[in-house]
Amino acid sequence: MKQSTNFTQPDVTERRRRWSAGVLLGFALVISACSSADLASGAQTAPETTVATKSTPVVTETAPPTTAAPPPETKPNIDEVVAEEVDAVDEYLNQLESSGFGGVVAIREGSDITSRAYGIADRENAVPIDTETVFDIGSITKQFTAAAILRLEMDGRLSVDDQLGQHVPGLPEDKAAITLHQLLTHTSGVPNALGPDDQPIGRDHFLALAGVAPLLHEPGDQYLYSNVGYALLAAVIEFETGGSYEAYLRSAVLSPAGMFDTGYVLPNWDGHTIAVGYRHPRGDRFGRPNEQAWDVDGPYWNLHGNGGLLSTAFDMLAWDEALSNDEVLDSIAKEKFFAPHVLDGPDEGVHYGYGWEVIPTPMGTPIITHAGTNHVFFAHFLRFPDQDVTIYMATNSLEDGHGNIAFDVANHVLDGALEVMFGS
């Protein structure tokens, strides 16, 4: 049964909520690179429940003249036009429900927010997904690591032009000479992975392995997606702050953004359901992200700082709003954050920023996006800053076609403006 309620924007000092996601062009790159684990089997889609929230458009009417009655209207009034636009998006969202999709989808158009939840978070206990269900957001984690580095730069504690050896001791010369900018843009030459995500290695062991791993190209020469690079950035954060990666992330990025239900081990998950992952197509239980092999401070270091953060749709809404103001990053930092620093593939104009892909659209404006997956969980975060539109989706059972959902939603919201990008 589907329920609909009006969504009221909370006070920004209490909890800022906005939604966003990634894009199909980036999905093909990220789905192969986000995780080094082999999690290819999957799950049947369970019976679903749906929760919907959306804001109601406000129509301001002009008082009629007091002399003569106005002539009959020959065109639809604004209520009818808005209803038609909403119906087009609703129709697609209803199709998701009937298709058996399990997860969350959220849309923000200006101040109007629509959110839907579908399916089952815990099939063994028949717990439905809702808009506060906690999902693994995979490599979307990278943008939070990048934001933490930029916060340290804002505070004068480092520069993105610094060499890695200035902040992480004991590295061999070839690794020590890599710049933080090269790590942020996947141009450092370090490999994508040093082992499976759940390999029980701590920070020092990870750094020793990274130190002896041969570089795949000279630093700065080319783009090569690297989870190792972002784990090295997490190590920079720990050496610079003297505390844990997550502790600094929480104090400098997540809390200022109003993201109190995002993290590895520090959030209080009471009152939230952490979604259980299911492998498609057989429905094998993968389990909750924090039921996997983790250390006391979260995932082991093959995953630390490059993936595995847990979050809710409400918190991703808060992140979207924080990116629209200076609560976390100032204008100079955001310019670096979103800049198209390096071409990241064969597609013309597709660039990588700091934890983001920047992709041109037929509208002549960019999508700023990232996706994340371990081939069980999948999340997609998609921002159209010039159109003031964001899309977010997440699922706990990745199936064929799920990588297109956020992009398809965006195409409906933008009246088909993106069709040429994927031929639908």
Image (cartoon, grey):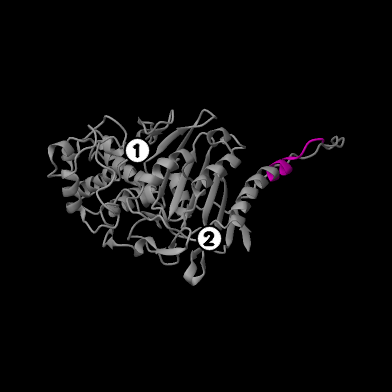
Residue occupying image coordinates x 38% and y 45%: 32
Q: Amino acid at mark 1?
A: Tyr
Q: Residues within 10 Å of mark 1 (few under 14, many from 20)?
A: many
Viewed as shown, does residue 200 lie left or right of 353? left
Viewed as shown, does residue 178 lie left or right of 421? left
Residue occupying image coordinates x 35% and y 62%: 290
Q: Amino acid at mark 2?
A: Thr
**Where are the magenta residues, as a range?**
74-83
Query: Which residue is more in the foreground, 228 or 59?
Result: 228
Residue occupying image coordinates x 60% and y 51%: 93
Give the residue number, with chain letter if any, for mark 1.
354
Query: Which residue is more in the foreground, 208 or 149?
Result: 208
Q: Is residue 165 above or below residue 9?
A: above
Q: State whether residue 327 appears in this view.
A: no
Q: Residue furthest bottom?
A: 125
Residue occupying image coordinates x 64% and y 49%: 90
Question: What label does residue 67 carry, if any?
Answer: none
**Prevailing SS of the magenta stretch:** helix
Give the residue number, with chain letter if any, for mark 2.
45
